[in-house]
Amino acid sequence: MDILLPHSLAALPAWAGIIVTIGVPVVIALVFGRAMFALFTPHEFATNATVGAVKYGFVVEIYAVVAALALVGAWDTYQTSRDTLQKEASGLYMLALSVDTFSGPDFAEARKEMRAAIRGYAAAVVSDDWPAMQAGTPNPASDAAFQRLTRAFLDVDGVSSGQQALQQKIGDWVGSVAEARIGRLSVTSRSLAGLIWLLVITVSVAVIAFQWFFNGGSATMHYAMGSVIALIVGAVLLVALKLAFPYVGDPALLTPRPFLALMEVS
């Protein structure tokens, strides 16, 4: 199983994602419970209660480990993506602030090109990179715009001591943008592997289903408890999916808002 199914679930609108990741587990729990009550008698359930409780405890422990693995991995993906996005936008912002340092008529064309390069790169990220990232197939379509940005800032020769000192920092900012850009475009490769998602879904279904192999007392109470367990399992899955794919979904956790602001640099 590849990451296509988890990516598709994460890309759903918020209401649809809640229905699929939370509603479906609840339906599975209720249907499975109904089937178990139809197949077995209360006496058979009571006989299996002690052994079933021990085995269910083992399944729950496995689920806890797998859920923690998925949530920690998904949170790491989100946090890395967020920090990378902030780093790239911050580097571009500092470059935009540095433009006016090259004052005077001799640098008029250079200033114009610098600002145009920033706007062009930000526009390329929004119009080209972002849709590809949302589709889960990052494509470095903004490469030409980034090359233009690099040349616009690194090819300028400062005259004053202040301009020459700033050029050293400009190189650092361009390098920071380049590093963050690579990280942003490679976010898909850092997502949880398909086998991890398969394990998460398998253990989730096991937790939802296994609880019905033993019970006693009120059937209504067991349906209620089964629904609550399914809600918890579905909520964990929903959170893990949204964190693991921060650029997709409606709304997405991460948006191109910083780059939209940089498109207005003048």
Image (cartoon, grey):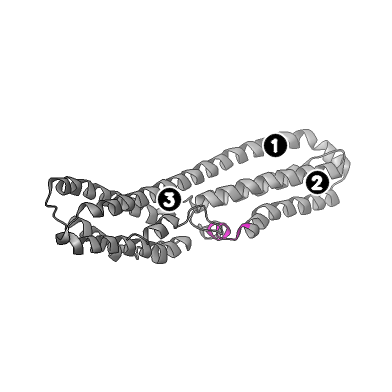
Q: Say left or right for 31 vs 77.
A: right
Query: Residue 135: x, y in percent?
Result: 48, 63
Q: Label 1, on which residue?
A: 55
Query: Residue 139: x, y in percent?
Result: 38, 64
Query: Residue 136: x, y in percent?
Result: 46, 61
Q: Amino acid at mark 1?
A: Lys
* Mark 2: secondary structure: helix
Instruction: State how far apart marks 2 and 1 are (Cα).
Output: 20 Å
The residue at 85%/52% (across/down) is: 38
Q: Label 3, on which residue?
A: 190
Q: Earlier in the sequence, mark 2 or mark 1?
A: 1
Q: Label 2, on which residue?
A: 223
Query: Residue 175: x, y in percent?
Result: 26, 50
* Mark 3: secondary structure: helix
The residue at 54%/58% (across/down) is: 249
How busy is the neighbourhood of tag 1: few (under 14 within 10 Å), some, or many (20 plus)?
some
Q: Say left or right for 24 vs 31.
A: left
Q: Residue 266: within the magenta?
A: no
Q: Residue 8: within the magenta?
A: yes
Q: Is residue 239 above or below residue 131?
A: above
How busy is the neighbourhood of tag 3: few (under 14 within 10 Å), some, or many (20 plus)?
some
Q: Residues in magenta?
A: 7-14
Q: Is residue 12 visible?
A: yes
> Are the residues tagged 2 and 1 within 8 Å (C-beta)?
no
Instruction: State how far apart marks 2 and 3 are (Cα).
Output: 39 Å
Q: Is residue 197 visible?
A: no
The residue at 70%/38% (across/down) is: 56
Q: Say left or right for 62 vs 174.
A: right
Q: Earlier in the sequence, mark 3 or mark 1?
A: 1
Q: Amino acid at mark 3?
A: Arg
* Mark 1: secondary structure: helix
Observer-nearest residue: 47 or 261?
Answer: 261
